[in-house]
Image (cartoon, helix red, strand yellow):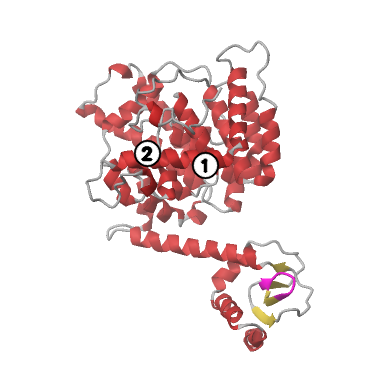
Amino acid sequence: MAHAHHFLERLDRVTREQTEFALDLYRDHEAVAHVLQHVRLPEDAPRVALAIDDPKEGPFVIVTRDGRFVTCLGKGMRHELPVVPRSQIDALLAKVADKRARKELAQRELRVDEEEGDLFQRVVSRGSRFAREDFVALSAFEAMLGTAPYLVMLEMALEAIKLRVAMAHGVGKVVVKTTSIPAFEKLDRLEWSVAHLTVLAGTGERSTLDAVLQTAKSPLGSLTFPCSLQQGSTFFLRSAWLAGRLGKGAIPDYKAAFGNLADWMALLDAGLGLGAIGLRHASTLPDVRRILQAYEVCPEGAAEGSNERSRATVAKAVLGVLDKVDEHVDTTHKIGRDFCVTLSQRAPEGHPMRFEKPEQVPDDLARTAVLAFDGPIDVSPIQNMMLSALPVAARASGEDFYYPREIVRAWLGPWTPEESLERLKRFAEPKKEGVRAAPKPGRNDPCPCGSGKKWKKCHGGPGAPATPG
């Protein structure tokens, strides 16, 4: 208590605004503990100076290593203690505030008959209708979850593959019957559980992400390829996002996958993962560029559709994105706004989430419209869209992959088994031998991205990204 009294008595050394900040810290022991746990301090430093303003001149709040308040030093007062800059303190306090807001939302999300554990059932029960509120509520428990989302994702990805193999034989002739609906629903829930768990696996703090790196053993390609194997653009972008979150420590895995694997989807997944790491962590960008540049030129004599040509195509395409990030971000927002206008027509006239013009669509919804879009990845315009969206995906927050619940209800409606049938048809088609440009549609043909627009008004219009290869 003597330390605390001394601290309070020395607050006359700072301005009123600085006093308010110091007192906010004093009253919030949990927040101070979080700050001290997440800064690097010399092991022999018993006390720490928390900068209220300038990191050199101060003022400073002096606390012990375990968070007890000692004193307050005015501007210019000398000391020999390690300093935590105000900018770092503010960033860490913002994380504390964000965690508290997520926990409050989690409590509001619980129905009368639900417990906290019931929130996790939504991952496996809501499929593509899993809403932003569901994700944010679950992310409040990331510290408790640890590496579990990633490990469960691997299990569910393998289970989804097995179920698809069993269902895909002769799928072109399949008609959805009442007796087959449970199987289609099970497949839908499995595939989307993989998507949700991939994003949940990346919401943890650095210690959790490092634990994922240490324990991750993917038998199918890169650390995130099991998610990409669900064959949809949103699955590839979620994989890239998680790669970006894992950061520098994941580069060897993605480098090995990109250089050694012989499947074009695995190459695309690894290339996007490398690009996402470089985009999210500027310090890694030179290394990422060097890895991709080593494969940018296709070896002489490489056959069309060969792994060498696919590898070179992906490397060149991702490098092109890294060279023109702002242009691709603008293109992604444009595509997303067009998506939102088209999808929102399902809402009745006068609905607040119905947009008549692209300029009415907020940036956050435009981002989500692209990141959440489940397009077939063997279609050239979808590959273009994924590449354009890579900078947005790499720097996104987890909730950016999800629509708010109000939009889920207004735009998406209830799930139908025909959705799973259409997804299943992707796996029944002959396996593509490489990443290549598909023949362009006619100017007045529907755009293959599914926007409902003509090709010339969508991906065939001015400003659309170039086709890979």
The part of the chain drawn in magenta is: 51-58
- The residue at the point 57 percent across, 13 percent down is 304
Kind of residue indicated by mark 1: Val
Query: In the picture shown, does residue 111 fall above or below 69?
Result: above
What kind of element bears circle 2?
A: helix
Q: Mark on residue 278?
A: none
Depth check, front residue: 460 or 146: 460
The quarter holding residue 41 reads bottom right
Kind of residue indicated by mark 2: Phe
In the rendered view of the protein, which quadrant contains the N terminus?
bottom right
* Distance CA(mark 1)–CA(mark 2): 15 Å
Query: In the picture shown, does residue 125 fall above or below 374?
Result: below
Q: Which residue carries the number 1 mark?
A: 329
Depth check, front residue: 241 or 297: 297
Measured from the top left, where is residue 441 in percent x and y?
Answer: 40, 20
**Left or right: residue 299 compared with residue 362:** right
**Left or right: residue 213 compared with residue 225:** right
Q: Mark on residue 339?
A: 2
Q: Is residue 370 visible?
A: no
Circle 1 Cα neighbour tier, 10 Å, few/some/many (<14 / 14–19 / ≥20): some
